[in-house]
Amino acid sequence: MNSLNKWQYGAFILRIVLGLIFLVHGYQKFEGGLSGVAGFFGSLGLPGFMAYVVAVIELAGGILMLIGLGTRWIAAAFAVIMLVAIFTAKLSLGFTGGYELELALLGMSLGLFFTGKQFLALENVFSRGKANA
C-alpha cells in the first residue's frame, strides 16, 4: 500500500464518519421539532429560519457526504455551520465541554474540502475525464 492509497483510505474514513455525524444531527433536529431549534437559534441572536436551513444542510449534506457527491462543497457548508456554532454558542463554554466537538468537525470538514478526488465517491463517476476541482 503506497502513501497515496493511505491518504485516500484516511479521507474515505473521514468522509463516512463526518457524513454519518451530520446526518444524525440533522435527523435529530427534524425529529425533535424544528420550532425548538429555531427558538434556540433566536436566543443566540440568529434568525430562526436558519434552523431549517441548517437542519436541511446537515441531513441532506450527510447523505451526500456518505455517497461522495459534492464532497468539497458540503464540507465547506459544514465548516461554516461549525464556525457559527463555535462563535455563537460554544466559545464561552470553554474547550472541554464546549467547542471541542465543533472544532474537531470543523477540522474534518476543512480536511475534506482541501482533499482532492475521494475514494469510493459517486462524484468520481460524474467527473471522469475532468480535471480535479
Image (cartoon, grey):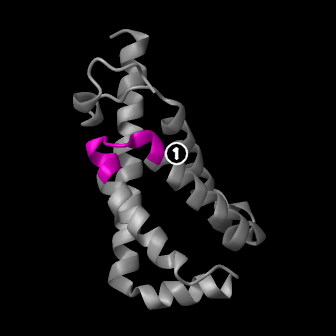
Residue under the point 36% across and 38% down: 13
* Direction top: furthest residue: 2
Query: Where is residue 120 shown, x and y percent of the image?
Result: 25, 31
Which quadrant is home to the N terminus? top left
Kindly indicate the quadrant of the structure image that contains residue 55.
Answer: bottom left
Residue under the point 72% across and 65% down: 87
> Is 85 located above or below residue 119 in the figure?
below
Nearest the camera: 107 or 118? 118
> Is 113 located above or below residue 33 in the figure?
above
Q: Is 65 covered by the magenta stretch?
A: yes
Q: Amino acid at mark 1?
A: Ser
Nearest the camera: 48 or 79? 48
Q: Circle 1 is placed at which residue position?
A: 109
Q: How packed is label 1: few (under 14 Cα within 10 Å), some, or many (20 or more)?
A: many
Residue under the point 34% across and 20% down: 130
Direction from residue 118 to residue 36 in the image, left or right: right
Majority SS type along the magenta span: helix
Direction from residue 104 to residue 24 in the image, left or right: left
**One can see residue 38 in this view:** yes
**SS under mark 1:** helix
Query: Where is residue 119 shown, x and y percent of the image?
Result: 31, 28
Nearest the camera: 103 or 47? 47
What's drawn in magenta, residue-wise? 64-73
Direction from residue 8 to residue 108 in the image, left or right: right
